[in-house]
Amino acid sequence: LFYISSCKYEKDRVVNPAKKQSEVKNWGGDAYSDAQLWRIVPRFNVTVSTEYDRSTRGDIWNQQGEEWEFMQYYGLYRDPTAPVPIPNMGPYEAALRSSLQEALLVNNVNEANSDGFMEYMDEALARGRNVWRFEEKMWEWRWTEMKKAEVPPGHRCTNFHLRAFFTETLGGAYSVNLRAANKVICSEDGYIYDDDFIFNNDYYTSYLPSIKPS
């Protein structure tokens, strides 16, 4: 916690007694009361996980094997009803990256998955700096790719991807979610498990009764 002093009036401090953005003001009254204390918080609360995209192919009784082609979605997604454009894109991008990095550390996400998150975050932001979609009034932060996977005979394969949800700490209207690296995971016994790639999987266990219990 810290105090914010006025540059012009050295004895004044910045206060917000009502805890409202519209009530921020200078205060020259009682020195150093708790009402004048401030703290730094991340702009976004971030939830990271591996998500099942409800895309499965093959089964343990199929002895033929097959090639599986599917559409994969990547990038940053916003609520289509959210206000546009986003102001101050430089600080906004910096807040997204720093909040994601903190979430990866707090959740002890392994190096490979952390790289997968950051690679696709940087790719999305780079695309957004170059392509403006006038008809949708937004930067082109998202893209799709056709992917192929070989389903071995007698295997069940499921597609997973890394997912991050960014919710503004102070209740702003610029929350987003990130769809990052994907991985097709195959199994011979019907259970889907991969300790290196899958984590925080409570979100989708109800959709995959064949996930191996921990």
Image: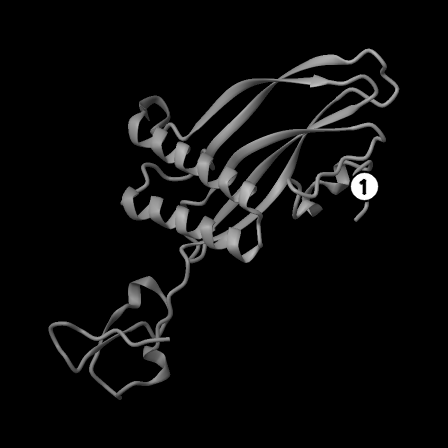
Q: Residue at x 76, y 41 (%)?
A: 206
Q: Residue at x 37, y 82 (%)?
A: 34
In the image: residue 9, left or right of residue 214: left
Task: Identify the image quadrant of the N terminus.
Answer: bottom left
Q: Which residue corresponds to mark 1?
A: 212
The residue lying toward the viewer, choosing from 11 and 163, is 163
Q: Position of residue 179 (x, y in %)?
A: 52, 35
The three-letter amino acid code for the residue at tag 1 is Lys
The residue lying toward the viewer, choosing from 123 and 21, is 123
Q: In the rendered image of this protein, does residue 171 appear above or below residue 41?
A: above
In the image: residue 176, left or right of residue 132: right
Q: Residue at x 47, y 55 (%)?
A: 102
The residue lying toward the viewer, choosing from 121 and 80, is 121
Disc 1 is placed on an element classified as loop
Q: Position of residue 195 (x, y in %)?
A: 70, 43
Q: Position of residue 205 (x, y in %)?
A: 75, 42
Q: In the rendered image of this protein, does residue 113 appear above or below residue 45?
A: above
Q: How many marks?
A: 1
Q: Position of residue 187 (x, y in %)?
A: 78, 29
Q: In the rendered image of this protein, does residue 127 appear above or below residue 8?
A: above
The residue lying toward the viewer, choosing from 55 and 214, is 214
Q: Residue at x 71, y 28 (%)?
A: 158
